[in-house]
Image (cartoon, grey):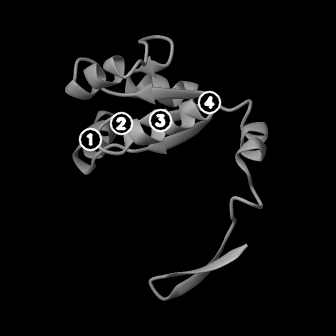
Amino acid sequence: MAKINFGGIYEDVVTREEYPLKKAREVLKNETIAILGYGVQGPAQALNLKDNGFNVIVGQRKNSPSWEKAINDGWQEGKNLFEIEEAVKRGTIVAFLLSDAGQNCSLAKN
């Protein structure tokens, strides 16, 4: 563990030596990580997880520029690219990376 100062608050943080990628893959091997939003943060998070061997799906509004970006990045509709509501149903771990405006819009639908 490392003790790190976050704005004046010291927290114990697990380091890579204590929790290597191999261990993370083992712990999360049966999980589906749903990345909601493919705007600013979504591509980096989703592609990094996918490239490191995790089971990842993307949730994005269909027919949006970000949907097209996801397709261009290799995500496949119905396989690992879904509309947001479907991705939430399929994911066992959900990373909510929608913009503030997108969050408000998504919450308003429900």
Amino acid carrying mark 4 in the image = Thr
Q: Which mark is residue 46?
A: 3
Instruction: Evaluate if marks 4 and 1 touch, with contact meaning CB atoms under 8 Å apart.
Output: no
Amino acid carrying mark 1 in the image = Gly
- Which sits earlier in the primary sequence, circle 2 or circle 3? 2
At x 37% / y 23%, what residue is drawn? 73
Q: Position of residue 2 (x, y in %)?
A: 68, 75
Between the C-alphas of marks 2 and 3, the distance is 10 Å
Residue 26 occupies quadrant: top right
Between the C-alphas of marks 4 and 2, the distance is 16 Å
Amino acid carrying mark 3 in the image = Ala
Pointer 1: what residue?
102
Q: Give SS at disc 1.
A: helix
- Which sits earlier in the primary sequence, circle 3 or circle 1? 3
Q: Residue furthest bottom?
A: 8
Report the quarter where the C terminus lies. Answer: top left
Foreground disc of the pair 3, 4: 3
Mark 4, residues whose alpha carbon is within 10 Å: few (<14), some, or many (≥20)? Answer: some
Between the C-alphas of marks 1 and 2, the distance is 8 Å
Pointer 4: what residue?
32
Pointer 2: what residue?
37
Establish if 13 lies above or below 106: below
At x 69% / y 58%, what residue is drawn? 16
Establish if 45 lies above or below 62: below
Instruction: Evaluate if marks 1 and 2 touch, with contact meaning CB atoms under 8 Å apart.
Output: yes
Between the C-alphas of marks 4 and 1, the distance is 22 Å
Instruction: Evaluate if marks 3 and 1 touch, with contact meaning CB atoms under 8 Å apart.
Output: no
